[in-house]
Image (cartoon, helix red, strand yellow):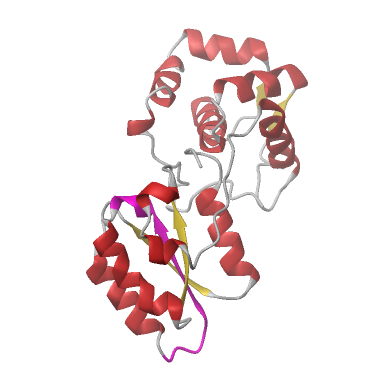
Amino acid sequence: GPAGTGKTTLAHLLADAVGAHMVTLSAVSSGVADARKVMEGARGGLFKTVLFVDEVHRWSKAQQDVLLPAVEDGTVTLIGATTENPSFEINGALLSRMRVFVLEPLAAGDLVELLRRALGDAEHGVSGQGITADDDALELLATEADEKVYNIVHLIYHARRYEGSSKDYEFSRRTMEEHWATGYDDMARTLAHPEVLQRPQSPDGVFTFDLK
């Protein structure tokens, strides 16, 4: 599925649901040697291992072959994420042993619902942090997010930082347009360029707003 549809989040939820140890590799920055280390470590382990390979299509089909034996014998449960068509980009033998789930871009209504959940959830969201939003603001946020959940996270996170951690912040069309008309539009321009996006982190380095 496209970027921002929740592929990585679903992988974490699946691993957590079965009580498995999850190891994440990015095919952009990791190679088959890294995958071999994971598979070796999984053999004889006390816990089931889920190997999540992000952007798995970036490995050649010959490189993907390395995963096949461990998938066949159950050493690891492989979850691969790709923005490409698996029929063309994934090794045929490997693909035949996997199930493909296609994730569609989120509609504006879905993003509005996620925002409402974030605003009302103290454990995984921002409830109790002095952030409020009216319905008009939620719809505007969803529109500006371009179908991507992490763009909404950026909008909330940077608005919060812009106001200062000690102040309450009310999302409304007026306040959002005021920020976009001033210095806040620097962040909006950043959102328009996914290649420079990074997932927002709290000061202690933990990814924020990990919603379930």
Q: Is residue 24 visible?
A: no
Front one among 92 and 148: 92
| Left or right: 37 in relation to 147 | left
Q: Residue at x 46, y 10 (%)?
A: 182
Q: In x, y percent, where is residue 142?
A: 63, 25
Q: Which residues are magenta?
A: 44-58
Q: In x, y percent, where is residue 31?
A: 24, 62
Residue that sits furthest to the bottom in the current view:
44
Q: Residue at x 43, y 25 (%)?
A: 191
Q: Is residue 151 visible?
A: yes
Q: Residue at x 39, y 30 (%)?
A: 194
Q: Residue at x 69, y 41 (%)?
A: 118
Front one among 82 and 118: 82
Residue 131 occupies quadrant: top right
| Left or right: 129 in relation to 31 | right
Q: Is residue 196 magenta?
A: no
Q: In x, y percent, where is residue 137?
A: 69, 19
